[in-house]
Image (cartoon, helix red, strand yellow):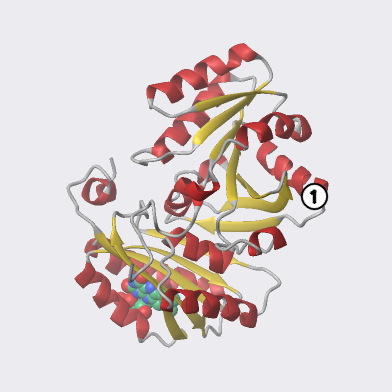
Amino acid sequence: MDPWDQAHGAASAEGPVARIMYASQAAIRHSVYQEMERIRASAVKHNEPAGIATALLHQSGWFVQWKEGPAPALQKIMDRVAGDVRHFDLRVVHRSRGPRLLSGPWSMAIVQCGETPADMEMRVQQLKHQVDEGLQFSPAAVWRRLSTPMKHPGATRQQDPDAFQRVLVCGASGMGSFDLVAWLGEEHQVDVVHRRFAGAVERDVGTDYVDFEQEGRVWRVIAMARHGLHLPLTRAFIPDYSHFVLLLSIDQERNEQLLQRVLRAYEFLPHPPALIGVVSRPEMHALPAALARRHGIPYLRALADSRDPQASWAEVQPLLMHWQQAANSSLMSGTGGMRIGQ
Ligand SMILES: Cc1cc2nc3c(=O)[nH]c(=O)nc-3n(C[C@H](O)[C@H](O)[C@H](O)COP(=O)(O)O)c2cc1C
C-alpha cells in the first residue's frame, strides 16, 4: 500500500474531511501545460504533507479545482491559492464534509474544445445560482456539469439535467471500447467528445464519450483506456455509472488482468456499478463471473463478439434498461447530501 493510501485511504482511521470546489478565470500568458506543471510542483510540495488531495481542470480559459482534506490545512492552502495572480474571479461552487472521494493527491485535466470562456462562464453562473438557492450537487456532478455538460435536449427537459444514465466501457485488449463509442456516435448522428487527463506520474489517459437518446432514455456511454482506471479522478466518478461494460477477449489472461484493475478501482466503494461481461462463448463468463462474485459485485452476462460494436450493443443495451434513474441523480440525497434548508 502506498503511503498516501495508508494515511488517507478508505481503510485508514481518518474521519470525514472538508471538500471544496471553485471555478476561476485563468490569467495565463504562457503555455497552459507548463503553468499546470508548475502548479503541480507546488501542490505536490505543499498539499501532500498536509493531506490535501486535489484535481485541477483547465478548460476554455477557466480553472476548476476540487480539493479535499483536513479543514484547517485546506483553508490555509485556499487562502494562498486565492491570492495567486494566475487566476481571478474565483467562485466557490461546492462545499461539503464527508469521506474522501479523491483517492490520490493529484489529478489534472487540460481540455481543449471549441468553446469560448463565455460558454464556461454561463455554466459557472447557472451552477452558482442553483447552489446559492440551496441545491447541493456532489463534487463529481459539479465537475461534470462544468467540464462535460450533457447537452442532449432530452436531458435538459428533466428537472435535474445531470440525472442521465452513465455507462463506462473498457476493453480487455485493443480499442474496442473506443470503437463502440464511435459506432454509437455514427448510429445516433451525434459527435463523439474526446478528453485527456493525467495523474501524478502516469502518461495521459484518453477517454471518449457520446450522448444520445434511445428507448426514451438519455445515455452517456464513456470509453476509458485500461490504464486510466486507477487514476484518482477516474475512480471518483465510478459510483456515478449504472454499469461497467467489459469487452472481454478470447485471451483469459487479459480478461483476468482487466478484472484485477477493475477490482482495484472498485476497492472500498459502497455501491459499485454492476459489471456486464461481453464474450463470444458462454463458458468464457466463468472466470470473470467467479472473480466478481468473490468480491460481491453483480456480474451480468452478454453473449456477442466484443469486437463487433453493433452486436455487443444489441446484447448489452437490454441489460442496461434495468436501472432506476433516481439512483443515479447527482443531487446529494442518497450519497449523504441534501437540499440545504430542509
Ligand atoms: C488554479 C491554481 C491552483 C493552485 N493549486 C495549488 C494547490 O493545490 N497547492 C499549492 O500548494 N499551490 C497551488 N497553486 C499555487 C499557489 O497559488 C502558490 O503559487 C504556491 O502554492 C506557492 O508555493 P511555492 O512557491 O512553494 O511553489 C495553485 C495556483 C493556481 C493558479
Position of residue 182 in the picture relative to residue 11 (left or right): right
Position of residue 127 in the picture relative to residue 83 (left or right): right
Please identify the quarter of the rendering in which residue 153 is found.
Answer: bottom right
Ligand 1 image-quadrant field: bottom left
Label 1 CB sits under 8 Å from any ligand 1 atom? no
Picture quarter with the N terminus: top left
Residue at image location 40% in from the left, 73% down from the top: 134
In the displayed image of the protein, which residue is found farthest to the front? 342
Disc 1, SS: loop
Residue 265 location in percent, x, y? 43, 40
Position of residue 296 in the picture relative to residue 51 (left or right): right
> Does any portion of residue 42 appear in the rendered image?
no
Position above or below: 87 against 70: below
Residue type (three-letter) at the residue carrying disc 1: His
In the displayed image of the protein, which residue is found farthest to the left? 13
Tell me the residue that label 1 is attached to. Answer: 188
Residue 6 location in percent, x, y? 23, 45
Residue 75 location in percent, x, y? 26, 75
- For the residue pair 6 and 159, the one nearer the viewer reads as 159
